[in-house]
Amino acid sequence: MMKQPATAQSWIDLFGQHLTQQQLSAHTVAAYGRDLQQFALWLKQHAPATCLSQVHTEQIQSWLADPTSNPSPSTVNRRLATLKKFYEWLIQTQQLSVNPAHCLRSVKLPSSTPPPISETDIDGLLYAPDVNTPLGLRDKSMLELLYATGIRVSELVDLHLDQLDLEQRLLLVTHPNQTQQRLIPLGDDAYFWLNRYLIEARPVILRARCSEALFISTHGKALSRQALWLLIKKYAQQAHISQTLSPQSLRHAFATHLLKNGANLSVVQLLLGHKNPSTTQIYSHITRERLKQLHTEHHPRA
């Protein structure tokens, strides 16, 4: 049994160290920490005599349902998941015998997924950057790569030059938690624009500076997720796309368009890097519609 920390923040810091040792990404560790800090602050205001490590189920319920913060269902579920993981860790370290969050259930979320970008809108987005400028050529190659591979935005901004094999037309992608890698083939369009970017644009943007990052900013450093998101919004406006795009939009379109054109769900799961097959099941309705279409087209008594 480890020594009892004196403050809530000490508990949170120790838990963060535990998550880091489990090879969770820094972004995920920070998110857990923020949720616990908010709960600790709520306890200080509503139950000042209660330690973070010794709460009751009713107190957790009250925090999750607190109308002052007006949390969305997804926020409630994330906070609950954080507390369940935190108190499970306390049980593992023999600080608790019962998880006070264990009996609580997640809020049911709407089952519908956001509509994918149409192939027409994808074309408009991909043609929006001005490829006659170095930055436009960079942006064009980034958008083409996102749509061609379905990689996460966080995976794209973390790409290094040595992860790209243009000779074999392959991209080695590392998951943000650094524990999973996958090889993704590059199509003709992505290969063409990446090649142009590396030859014509990247050296101009870099201006004799050194960087291992594949996609760089004008400061010579890796492009940030926020900068990429702003670029996607800008080009969506230029392409007159009325649908609201998110950082996941091109990844979602990649999966949806693959399945609509006959790809196998297990192949899409592999390309997306989903460890849990259930994560890919949000696209299963597309494969069902595709099967119905094929049956209607080819079965003699359809």
Image (cartoon, rainbow, N blue to C red):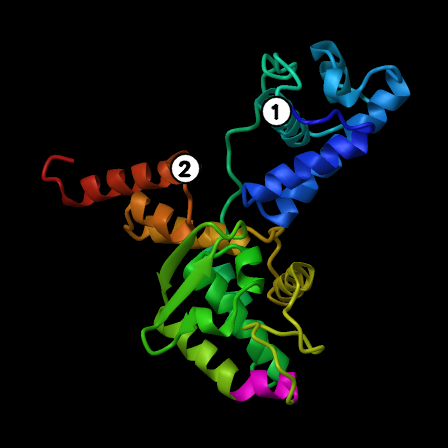
Q: Residues within 10 Å of mark 2 (few under 14, many from 20)?
A: few
What segment carries the magenta color?
200-207
Under mark 2, the amino acid is: Asn
Residue with the mark numbered 2: 276
In the visual, does 276 lie left or right of 114? left
Q: What residue is pinned by disc 1?
A: 93
Q: Earlier in the sequence, mark 1 or mark 2?
A: 1
Answer above or below: position of 67 versus 122: above
Q: Residue furthest left?
A: 300
Residue 225 lies, with reference to residue 15, above or below; the image says below
**In terms of secondary structure, where does tag 1 sit?**
loop
- Separation of marks 1 and 2 at Cα, in angstroms: 27 Å
Q: Is residue 220 above or below residue 116?
A: below
Residue 228, quarter of the rendered image: bottom right
Q: Give residue 32's position: percent from left, percent from top.
A: 67, 36
- Residue at 61%, 12% (x, y): give it: 98
Task: Kindly check if marks 1 and 2 are in contact, taking CB atoms under 8 A apart as contact.
Answer: no
Whether residue 69 can be seen here: no
Q: Is residue 177 visible?
A: yes
What residue is rendered at 52% in x and 66% in y? 159
Q: As shown in the figure, which amino acid type bears the numbered disc 1? A: Thr
Residue 178 horizontal/vertical position (percent): 51, 53
- Residue for point 43% across, 55% down: 254
42 sits to left or right of 198: right
Residue 51 position in % (x across, y down): 80, 19
